[in-house]
Image (cartoon, rainbow, N blue to C red):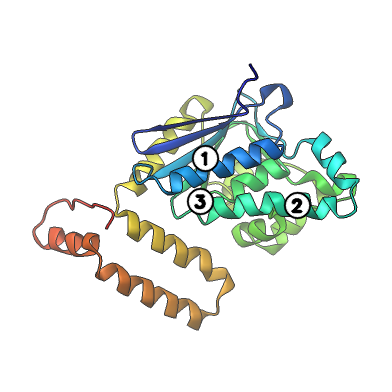
Amino acid sequence: MAEATILHELKNSIGYVTINRPKFLNAVNKEILAELHDILSMWKEDDTCRGIIITGAGEKTFSPGADINVFIAESQKAIGGREWSRYGQVVLQYLENLGKPSIAAINGMAMGGGLELTLACTFRIACETAKFGLPEIGVGIMPGWGGTQRMTRLVGKTKTMELVLTGEPISAEEALRTGLVSQVVPVDDLIPAAERFLKRIIKNAPVAIKLAMEAINSAADLSLSEGLGLESNLAGLLCMTEDGKEGIQAFTEKRKPVFKGR
C-alpha cells in the first residue's frame, strides 16, 4: 500500500499537516495540493479545529516546491503552465482565507512553490538551518503560486525584487530580519514553538479571530477609507456576538472569559 503523501492529525484543537514525500524532498504534486485542499475544507467546518501547523517530513527540507516532473508535463500543454499556476494559487488562497490561523513550521529548505506555500500561512517559524528562495528565474521562468504578490506584501518591493530576480537563497536569520519569519528556533523546538505561538492566539474568541484576519488580509487591496469602513462593520458585528458580550462582561467582572465561538 502506497504511503500517504500528506499526514494529518487533529489534536488539542490544532490541526497538524505534514508533507510526506521525503524521497522527493517533499516536492509538491497535484495529489498533495488536492489532498491539502480537502483537509483544509474539512477543518474549516470543524469547530474543534482552532488553528493549523504545516511542516515537512524529514530533518532537512520543508519543500523545494513543485514536482519538476509534473511541471514539465504541464508546461508542454498549450496553456498548461498557466493552468498549473492557477491550480496552486487556488489552493494556497483557500489556505490564506481559511478564517483560522496557520503556521508554517519550516524544518529546512523552502524553495519555489514550497516557500510560496509558507507565504499563504498566517505565520512562519523557521529552524536555524532553514533556507528560503525563489529560484525560478534561473530556469527562465518566475514564481507562479503567489510569490511575487505575497512576498511583496510581506517584505516590500525591493527585497522581493532581489529574491526573485537573483534567484539566490537567504538564511533563516536574514528571513527573520526582513520580517519573512516571526521566529527562528532550534529544530528540536520547532513544533513546540509553533504550538506555543498558536495557543497564544486560539485562547481568544474564534469569531473575533476570523473577522480580524479578514480585515487585515483585505488591507492591501482596499483604500484607507474602504478599509476603515470594513473594520467598523466587522467590529460592530463582533459587539453583537455572544462572545463579544461575554468578553466585555468578563472584563468588568475581572475574570477570564469563556468563549463559545458564537
Q: Are marks 1 and 3 in contact (CB under 8 Å)?
A: no
Tell me, yes or no, whether the two marked residues, 2 and 1, touch with CB atoms within 8 Å. no
Q: Quick one: SS at disc 1?
A: helix
Residue that badge 3 annotates:
122
Left or right of residue 77, residue 232 in this image: left
In the image, residue 119 lies at what x, y percent? 60, 50
Q: Count numbered badges in the picture.
A: 3
The image shows residue 101 at horizontal and vertical percentages of: 45, 49
Front residue (pair 30, 171): 30
Q: CB atoms at circles 3 and 2 under 8 Å apart?
A: no
Residue type (three-letter) at the residue carrying disc 2: Ser
Q: Quadrant of the N terminus?
A: top right
Residue 166 located left or right of residue 200: right
Per the model, the C-alpha gap separating discs 1 and 3 is 17 Å
Q: Mark 1 points at which residue?
A: 39
Q: Residue at x 63, y 31 (%)?
A: 108
Per the image, the residue denoted by label 2 is 85
User: In 3D space, how far apart are the residues under numbered discs 2 and 1 (Cα atoms)?
Assistant: 21 Å
Q: Which of marks 1 and 3 is in front?
A: 1
Q: Can I make out residue 160 in this image?
A: yes
Between label 2 and label 1, give the one nearer the viewer. Answer: 1
Residue 157: x and y, percent?
70, 63
Q: What label sits on residue 146 in the rendered view?
A: none
User: Which mark's residue is nearer the viewer, 3 or 2?
Assistant: 2
Q: Earlier in the sequence, mark 3 or mark 2?
A: 2
Up-down relation of residue 221 to residue 92 (above or below): below
Q: Distance between the residues labelled 3 and 2?
A: 21 Å
Vertical placement of 42 versus 79: above or below? Answer: above
- Quick one: label 2, few (<14), some, or many (20+) residues within 10 Å? some
Give the residue type at disc 3.
Answer: Thr
